[in-house]
Amino acid sequence: MAKVDENKEGIKGMVNPTRYGIERFAYLLMRLTGLGLLAYFVAHIYETSNILRGKVGWQEFLAITQTPEGHIILAIVIGMSVFHTVNGIRVMLGHGGIGVGKPARPDYPYAPQSQNARHKIAIYSSIVLAALAMMYGLAVMFGE
């Protein structure tokens, strides 16, 4: 039987947190939130187009979306929006050279300067801000 190459884990290897760390998690979450926001954008256009059916059509569709499940989906959208925005700003600043540290000689074992503590703090901050925004959204939607 042939030995399985550890570098060929497929999807399981891509989401393995012990192998890549928080940077890979942020990369994966950025892609997932982008797809989620795209799906929400398409659904929101469909929802808004229901106004063309008149007041009755608009009220019927709002009755579907103004439910506890609809509010939870909106809270998830809020969290996706906040994370995607804050992490995107972190990535843009990093590409501009802000916060990446000084270049260093790549001696083994190579530790990239761009994945320093400042960027890890920014990733954790974006996750915390997204969670706080989701909790605030839920408090507004479910609050009395």
Image (spheres, grey):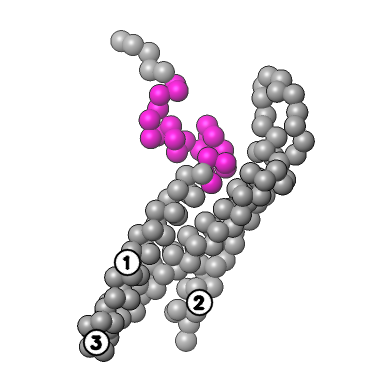
For the residues bearing labels 2 and 1, Cβ distance under 8 angstroms: no
Query: In this rendering, which labeled residue sits more in front, label 1 or label 3?
Result: 3
Q: Residue at x 26, y 89 (%)?
A: 55
Residue located beneath label 1 in the image: 43
Q: Is residue 17 magenta?
A: yes
Q: Main secondary structure of the magenta part?
A: helix
Bounds of the magenta span? 6-26
| Count of marks, rendered view | 3
x%, y% of residue 126? 59, 56
Q: Which mark is residue 54?
A: 3
Q: Secondary structure at mark 3?
A: helix
For the residues bearing labels 3 and 2, Cβ distance under 8 angstroms: no
Q: Is residue 129 above or below residue 116?
A: below
Distance from the alpha carbon under mark 3 to that under mark 2: 31 Å
Distance from the alpha carbon under mark 1 to that under mark 3: 18 Å
Is residue 84 or residue 25 the one in the foreground? 84
Q: Is residue 16 magenta?
A: yes
Q: Which mark is residue 139?
A: 2
Q: Residue at x 52, y 32 (%)?
A: 19
* Residue extending furthest toward the bottom: 55
